[in-house]
Image (cartoon, grey):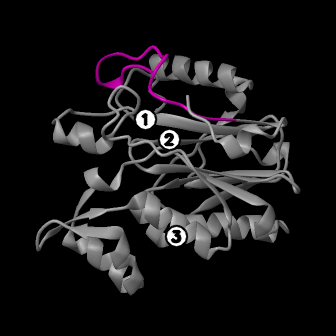
Amino acid sequence: MFFSEKLKKFGNLKHCFFSRKNGVSKGYYESLNCGLGSGDKKENVSKNLELVAKKITCSKESLITLNQKHSNQVIHFDSDGSVKNKLTGDAIVSEVKNIGIGILTADCAPIFFYDHKKKIIGCAHAGWRGALNGVIKNTVKQFNELNSNYNDLIAVVGPCIDKKNYEVKIDLFEKFISQDKNNESFFGKISSEKYVFDLRGFINKELSNLNIKNIDNVEMDTFSERELFYSYRRSRLNREPDYGRCISVILMT
């Protein structure tokens, strides 16, 4: 379990970037796999989600996650009646109390948002595709539409794959460069066809460009920290047939 020092100071807020520890799943999914989309036994994932809900102090029914698609789509909960589980999207902005909103990851970055004055929370799932296509921008835009001031907004980037372990091909490099030549600074060249990509650095640049000055990072590498995190990349490299998903949850009381 990992926390943001910036968010811990708010008594009305509970949050956690959960590791893969202290769950019931076995094999490739050991142990706190929270991905219903994985091949894990559904009863094990369900039990793991119950454990998470208990830690974050909400009912299992009040622990809300998305059907994530690496999109830039943001879901907005403005009242109890608007809250639904497993909607399709990659970010949630919520004004509702005692609802835990969560993101599932296995190398992508989970991002938390909090406006302590307007009492609005958010979470986003940002891999390269979502980040490039504007999931961060769209999430902040939703806050702005609720009259949130960027000076009051805190953003926290959780554990994700580190640049040194994030090898990509030239076509991905070209996608980023075609959007903005300055994006070249987030890539390191290995060969004529291969690069490494700094996902965390790119996300932080996106947040800064949106005038968010209050940014926190939980700097852990999901790829190398095998005991603590699931990693899509590591599982693929090891020719494992599947992989678990870690959950990150934020809740406002």
Q: Position of residue 21 (x, y in %)?
A: 46, 21
**Residue 34, relative to residue 41: is it above or below?**
below
Q: Position of residue 139 (x, y in %)?
A: 65, 63
Q: Can residue 84 be spotted in the picture?
A: no
Say which of 171 and 218 sits in front: 218
* Residue picked out by circle 2: 104
Instruction: Classify mark 2: residues with Cα within 10 Å, few (<14), some (14-19) or many (20+).
Output: many
User: At numbered mark 1, what does the secondary structure look like: helix, strand or loop?
Assistant: loop
Q: Position of residue 2 (x, y in %)?
A: 56, 33
Give the CA distance from mark 1 to mark 2.
6 Å
**In the picture provided, is 223 more to the left or to the right than 249?**
left
Say which of 197 and 52 sits in front: 197
Q: Amino acid at mark 3?
A: Lys
Q: Position of residue 29 (x, y in %)?
A: 35, 24
Decide which of tag 1 and tag 3 comes sooner along the chain. 3
Q: Which residue is rendered at x = 41% and y = 19% of the image?
A: 31
Give the CA distance from mark 2 to mark 3.
22 Å
Label for residue 205?
A: 3
Between disc 1 and disc 3, the foreground one is 3
Between disc 2 and disc 3, the foreground one is 3
Q: Which residues are magenta?
A: 15-31
User: At numbered mark 3, what does the secondary structure look like: helix, strand or loop?
Assistant: helix
* Residue picked out by circle 1: 245
**Residue 187, relative to residue 4: is it above or below?**
below
Magenta segment: does it hold 237? no
Instruction: Classify mark 1: residues with Cα within 10 Å, few (<14), some (14-19) or many (20+).
Output: many
Q: Amino acid at mark 2?
A: Leu
**Residue 190, relative to residue 23: is it above or below?**
below
Residues at discs 1 and 2 in contact (Cβ within 8 Å) = yes
Q: Amino acid at mark 1?
A: Arg
